[in-house]
Amino acid sequence: MEDTRIFGAMQSGTPHKSFIKTILGKVYMNILNPFDGKPTGILLSGDPTMKQETCILDVWSEKEYSYVKTMNKIHFETGTVIDFARPTEQVKEKTVEEYSDEELEVVINSKFLALQSILNKTESTPVLFRMVSLAKKMEKSEKIVGAIEARLSEVQLND
């Protein structure tokens, strides 16, 4: 059961804890292999100020964390290796190209200036074709359908 959680964390890229070396030289660390649970060693190298992956050690479970802290105590006491918090990825805002038909309907039903703003940011011909057909299906005014078709023409000319 624990193996499943560890492998899941490895796939999602969220380690239990991370450590980074603080010196320019190489640092040998005793670790537990996350796949078979056997003790092994790893060499951290590279420039820690650049936060290179070769300078960072990720542990995927509490068991590995305890082992690393115990077996490499001198590195932690001297400050050669310290805890490291990986920067969290910012949530990427969904683009118009990723919208479902229901979300496009909400955009088409929005106020005209908001619709115009979204249309000006849209560079995808297929999305604009979908918007035109949805607007016609929703029986929107000629002003709205015309605005979408005008943007579609602009994008097609630029392609």
Image (spheres, rainbow, N blue to C red):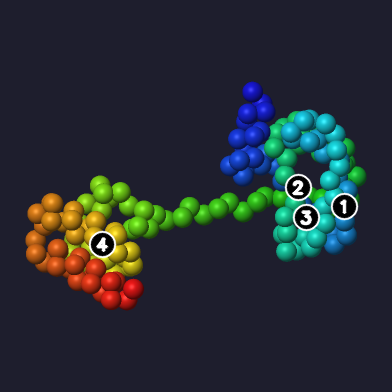
Residue lying at 85% horizontally and 59% vertically, measured from the top left: 23
Q: Which residue is mark 4?
A: 128
Quarter of the picture containing the C terminus is: bottom left
Quarter of the picture containing the N terminus is: top right
Residue 2, above or below 89? above
Q: Amino acid at mark 3?
A: Cys
Drawn side of residue 134 relative to residue 58, left or right: left
User: Few, some or many C-alpha atoms within 10 Å of disc 4 (few <14, some 14-19, many ≥20)?
Assistant: many
Q: Amino acid at mark 2?
A: Leu
Q: Which residue is mark 2?
A: 57
User: Few, some or many C-alpha atoms within 10 Å of disc 2 (few <14, some 14-19, many ≥20)?
Assistant: many
Q: Which mark is residue 59?
A: none
Q: Which residue is mark 1?
A: 27
Q: CA distance from mark 3 to mark 1?
A: 9 Å
Drawn side of residue 41 relative to residue 147, left or right: right
Q: Secondary structure at mark 1?
A: strand
Residue 100 in percent (x, y) is at: 30, 49
Drawn side of residue 58 relative to residue 135, left or right: right
Q: Amino acid at mark 1?
A: Val
Q: Secondary structure at mark 4?
A: helix
Q: CA distance from mark 3 to mark 4?
A: 47 Å
Q: Which residue is mark 3?
A: 55
In this view of the protein, can residue 76 be seen by the observer?
no
Drawn side of residue 148 relative to residue 11, left or right: left
